[in-house]
């Protein structure tokens, strides 16, 4: 029987190539799972579909709407994943491995959905940073903003995480408003296809926002423009080749590469065998060697150990590795599965051979190990292999990557030396240090950060909650300099912004307000006689304002406030002491008195659409207020953020309190919740 | 007489090549100014010097110390610039042109110095974003931080801005802690060299932080690692070539390109000849055509005009161009100088010829124009040339760049059409729209932002203060997608961070506090019985804290506060109305009462090192406080920022107010000024 041809999802239809394609073998049994080919696939149609159908549909939605769809998608995918686990076995993955890939992928989608609702506006534009005044008279200012690139994100993934690998790229692209073409590595593409098919069948994401290219991506990159992006995960060799594609270079296509690196984990000098950290180090090392059979671009390839602890570490790690049971995923007691293919096994063996030229194999024998529930020769099995290299001049441990269950122990003398050895990896996705000494942690992290995208500090305090050396998290950046590809993915909203263009807009305050949707100092205010607290979101407009006051501050007021609150700080109470203060030169009103009175001046007391003041941002006391001065406050509607699915939204108000001379004494933002309609539709007040 | 050989500054010494080199001609007279060559220059020594001498010296300094040096440098350079203006004439630049280049360059240095002191900490690490909780128990969290790359920034500059062009790259690199190699374009390298020589002679910047490579940069890029950076300004063609250098690709060298683009300026449909905007548009167009003889990568190449206003614009622009006086910089009445070289003139004429295939030349005749005070044939002179292209199918106006005093007028119908035409430039450094209509501005800016690094909105309101279409500003990003190179420079601190590596650190709160120098929720607090307000910066430590309270809130307190402040909002005063509020369900205390009382609880009233509370950040009211509840506040020293050159510094305190059950009701940061010593050295209190 001929194995089925894996399909691609192109311009709204499923497409199957009609040639023979390449056979993809089950990593455990060697049987053919599927055939893969992209022959005859209409690449221009795919790009066009993304650009003219998917992109525009996505850009119609606000960030919160996109997040809502991602949330529904994540929950839908989570609800029904047993079949995927079974399919995942065929890639060599145990259930523990699949949890990282499948649950990890779906969890990343959910994490992004939640992050976007909390941290992005319910809008299509992101404002970046503060308004920059560009002239002394206040008529000209700058505001940076982010808008989505208008092309397509071509996402080229590695074989080791067929689910997480594409979802961690798709989620931020989707949120940014950029459609995706998923290009999985052929070896495990059938698992990617199964998930993409569920996404398509869910009908949740707008058509054209996700397409699938099974098989070779040849020709795709040639057709990219300066609005398109490439997100690549895989070998440094392939990254190099793709990044040099003439059209990519000529059109300045954003190219983000995430390549395997020779990540290190350091045992702190304090972490002697009698400490919890020693055990944590050994346990983590064994985990990183065996999860996904060590096929992780974040795995520990170099374990740096204080010279005097080398023997202890060898012994403890060897003992722990002896407990590992290798075999068919799902088979009884199996704790480590197969590599993705027998070709991959050959690659690893070649690398191990190179390493053995300078290092001693201290645990694991590739020629002599047990396999449970599978044919050792047909499946791509290997034992975990620990090497020890005492020759610090040797280049191989810092240079040769065995992309499998392989790590090398290296001795170091002092933290500065560990930093130096870490840097010999020439750029890593991640490093870790296991120590309970804050000085050691600080020296290593600040010394090695420039070579790393992520550094984990593991000790007894975070042991229970720590997520592990090898696990990228959606809220933290993932990537690294140099050998690691020089890219950056994830990192919460940072990963969304990588799909957007930052633009500096220069204009008058009125124009900036109109463009960015946030009131800018100097822009028109509208004081139409209706107190803005009487306006629901249905009628409130940016710029609506109220000015109230003046109210004079007396010495009695200050003393009364001091007595009532207990804040008898000398600057308020003691004329001689206050006069000696370099900033005040005499008794002054409390800052909290100023803002309390300002609220008393601007508030509209009766029930109305303003439901609550839930906070204050950026409060600055600019000029001391002395007894006899009068306070006047102006409150201006600065930003309106209706909340999807709720009866209210957030309104940010610009508040300025001025003194008798009109100089600002306090500036701040007042944050309120305001009803969408008033009186509310449900009859509640 | 042989012209002098231009020197390079290499590894602490001035170096002159001994071969003939290339002759660089005066743009006005054609005489040889200098010879340029890098033959025999020791490139590896240069790189090594930057990496092992300049980088380490720079990283010893804090951001504020680096900023202090830049400020001194900027002032020193500003003080003595007449000679530079004279030299600048030889590049073809008028004094107006030189103001942009020379004063603009020195001003950028000063702007960066001031920005860094205000927005960066007096430290060597920049924290990025909020702490990310990574576990429910609060024992594991993430914090992103930026540390400087440990390599060298190779800065390859264009011929048109020999001073500004290198200083706008040098200033952010220096602040980041990254040493610079300046590689000027040979044509105007003598002016760059004159400024670098002043920098070296000032002795202000640490040795190894600035080197100069006069002549060919061949071989430099081959030796870069993943810690090095390239910042390139110049032609798209050269950008492509350099970006494809195998070592750059293989080592993921950060490569920032800023290339010429076909920038557009749009006349709004509202800007008819009777409006101030019409005149502003024409004036700006002529300015951009003539400043630097149009040799600006930000100049207006495409002027988009409502179809019905085309004739008016042609007429008005022609009239204004007729006033331009071309000739030797400094000669009487001259308002536009020469191009940088006769080769450059040939390039421009070739491009104009291509444009004339589809467009009509409506002003300026390259074969018939007057030149004042110079030989028209020996100097690289051209008249400003305005073209008009009514053929919207033609590709040339959007594709062929005449890097000189040349612009093409194109008609459009409706703002959406203008957006579409703007996008045909395939990525621009800058665009502008001249309109007084907020709807037009918003539609154009949000529609075209993805193709632009910067967009200027010009109208009667900002006309007087606006800095012009063609002027990048230090506080705004400079760069653009696609044809513009896909890079980003400047943008205030953003430009500094482009030289740093962002790293996610995962650790326990105690470890994060030790590494980042900012107290993290969940980390140790030290309540040693001494009130932290009694501690000067000399003894105060991160984590020092005080807990005060409880104090019970009564209904009388709420009513009293309402009466005193005037804040009689119904949620505080009216039980029935407050009960109907969806958030409160009964009368609650004022938020300002809570923070006022908290201050009353934690404050230490007597004169001491805490001089003032100058602000509050991120105040959030989390749970309503009802009568009968008790408040307790904990204040913890979060961040200490001594201010260089002052007797005090800023201290940020974490404040948490909890209710009777211990649930937080308010969280915020309190900002104070604290003396460095107490009692102060000068005897003042």
Image: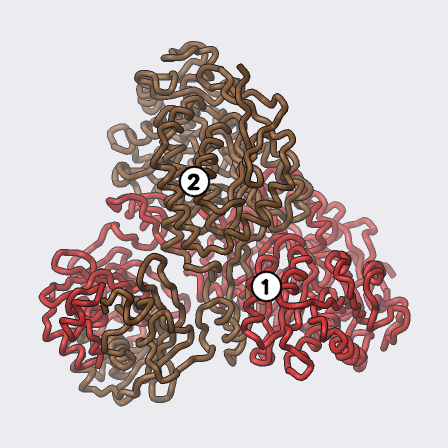
Chain colours: A brown, B red
Query: Is label 1 or label 2 in front?
Result: 2
Label 2: few (<14), some (14–19) or many (≥20) C-alpha neighbours in 10 Å: few
Q: CA distance from mark 1 to mark 2?
A: 40 Å
Residue B386 location, x and y as percent?
79, 70
Chain that bears disc 1: B
Q: Is residue B433 above or below residue B259?
A: below
Q: Is residue A63 left or right of residue A256?
A: left
Q: Foreground: B671 or A538?
A: A538
Q: Residue at x 21, y 61 (%)?
A: B623
Q: Foreground: B387 or B649?
A: B387
Locate the C terminus of chain B and report the quarter of the image it occupies: bottom left
Label 1: which secondary element: strand
Q: Is residue A107 above or below residue B412?
A: above
> What residue is shown with label 2?
A202
Q: Foreground: A219 or B164?
A: A219
Residue B332 location, x and y as percent?
80, 81
Q: Residue at x 24, y 76 (%)?
A: A596
Label 2: which secondary element: helix
> What residue is shown with label 1?
B454
Q: Residue at x 63, y 73 (%)?
A: B434
Residue B12 location, x and y as percent?
63, 53
Q: Residue at x 52, y 25 (%)?
A: A187
Residue B285 location, x and y as percent?
71, 73
Residue A30 in view: yes
């Amino acid at each position: 029987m001929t194995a089925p041809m894996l399909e691609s999802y192109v311009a709204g239809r499923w497409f199957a190539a009609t040639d023979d394609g390449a056979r993809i073998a089950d990593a455990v049994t060697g049987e053919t799972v599927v055939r893969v080919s992209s022959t005859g696939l209409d690449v221009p149609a795919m790009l066009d579909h993304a650009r003219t159908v998917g992109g525009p549909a996505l850009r119609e939605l606000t960030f919160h709407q996109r997040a809502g769809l991602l949330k529904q998608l994540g929950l839908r995918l989570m609800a029904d994943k047993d079949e995927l686990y079974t399919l995942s076995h065929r890639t060599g993955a145990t259930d523990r491995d699949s949890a990282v890939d499948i649950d990890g992928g779906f969890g990343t989608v959910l994490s992004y959905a939640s992050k976007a609702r909390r941290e992005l506006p319910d809008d299509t534009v992101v404002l970046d940073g503060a308004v920059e005044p560009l002239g002394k008279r206040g008529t000209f200012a700058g505001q940076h903003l982010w808008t989505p690139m208008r092309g397509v994100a071509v996402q080229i993934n590695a074989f080791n995480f067929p689910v997480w690998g594409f979802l961690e790229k798709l989620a931020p692209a989707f949120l940014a408003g950029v459609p995706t073409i998923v290009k999985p590595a052929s070896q495990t593409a059938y698992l990617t296809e199964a998930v993409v098919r569920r996404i398509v069948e869910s009908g949740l994401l707008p058509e054209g926002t996700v397409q699938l290219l099974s098989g070779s991506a040849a020709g795709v990159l040639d057709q990219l423009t300066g609005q398109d992006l490439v997100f690549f995960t895989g070998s440094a060799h392939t990254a190099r080749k793709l990044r040099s594609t003439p059209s990519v270079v000529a059109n300045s296509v954003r190219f983000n590469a995430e390549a395997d690196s020779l990540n290190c984990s350091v045992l702190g000098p304090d972490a002697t065998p009698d400490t919890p950290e020693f055990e944590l180090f050994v346990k983590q090392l064994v985990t990183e060697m065996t999860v996904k059979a060590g096929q992780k671009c974040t795995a520990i390839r170099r374990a740096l150990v204080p010279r005097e602890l080398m023997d202890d570490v060898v012994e403890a790690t060897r003992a722990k590795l002896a407990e590992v049971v290798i075999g068919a995923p799902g088979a009884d007691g199996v704790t480590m599965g197969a590599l993705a293919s027998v070709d991959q096994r050959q690659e690893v063996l070649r690398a191990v051979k190179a390493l053995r030229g300078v290092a001693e194999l201290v645990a694991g024998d590739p020629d002599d190990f047990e396999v449970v529930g599978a044919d050792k020769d047909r499946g791509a099995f290997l034992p975990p292999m620990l090497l020890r290299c005492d020759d610090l001049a040797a280049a191989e441990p810092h240079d040769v990557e065995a992309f499998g269950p392989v790590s090398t122990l290296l001795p170091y003398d002092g933290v500065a030396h560990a930093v130096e050895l870490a840097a010999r990896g020439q750029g890593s996705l991640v490093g870790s240090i296991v120590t309970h000494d804050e000085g050691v942690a600080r020296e290593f992290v600040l010394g090695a950060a420039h070579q790393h995208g992520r550094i984990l500090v593991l000790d007894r305090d975070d042991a229970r909650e720590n997520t592990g050396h090898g696990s990228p998290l959606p809220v933290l950046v993932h990537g690294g300099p140099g050998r690691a590809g020089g890219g950056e993915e994830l990192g919460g909203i940072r990963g969304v912004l990588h799909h957007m263009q930052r633009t500096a807009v220069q204009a008058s305050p009125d124009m900036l307000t109109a463009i960015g949707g946030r009131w800018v100092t100097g822009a028109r205010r509208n004081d139409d006689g209706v107190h803005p607290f009487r306006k629901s979101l249905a009628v409130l407009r940016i710029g609506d304002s109220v000015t109230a006051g003046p109210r004079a501050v007396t010495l009695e007021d200050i003393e009364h406030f001091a007595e009532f609150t207990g804040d008898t700080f000398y600057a308020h109470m003691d004329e001689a002491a206050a006069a000696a203060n370099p900033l005040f030169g005499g008794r002054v009103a409390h800052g909290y008195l100023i803002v309390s009175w300002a609220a008393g001046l601007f508030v509209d007391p009766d029930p109305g659409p303003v439901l609550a003041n839930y906070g204050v941002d950026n409060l600055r006391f600019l000029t001391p207020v002395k007894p006899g001065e009068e306070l006047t406050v102006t409150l201006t509607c600065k930003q309106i953020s209706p909340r999807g699915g709720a009866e209210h939204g957030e309104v940010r108000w610009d508040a300025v309190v001025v003194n008798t001379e009109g100089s600002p004494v306090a500036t701040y933002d007042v944050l309120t919740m305001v009803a969408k309609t008033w009186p509310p539709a449900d009859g509640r007040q």
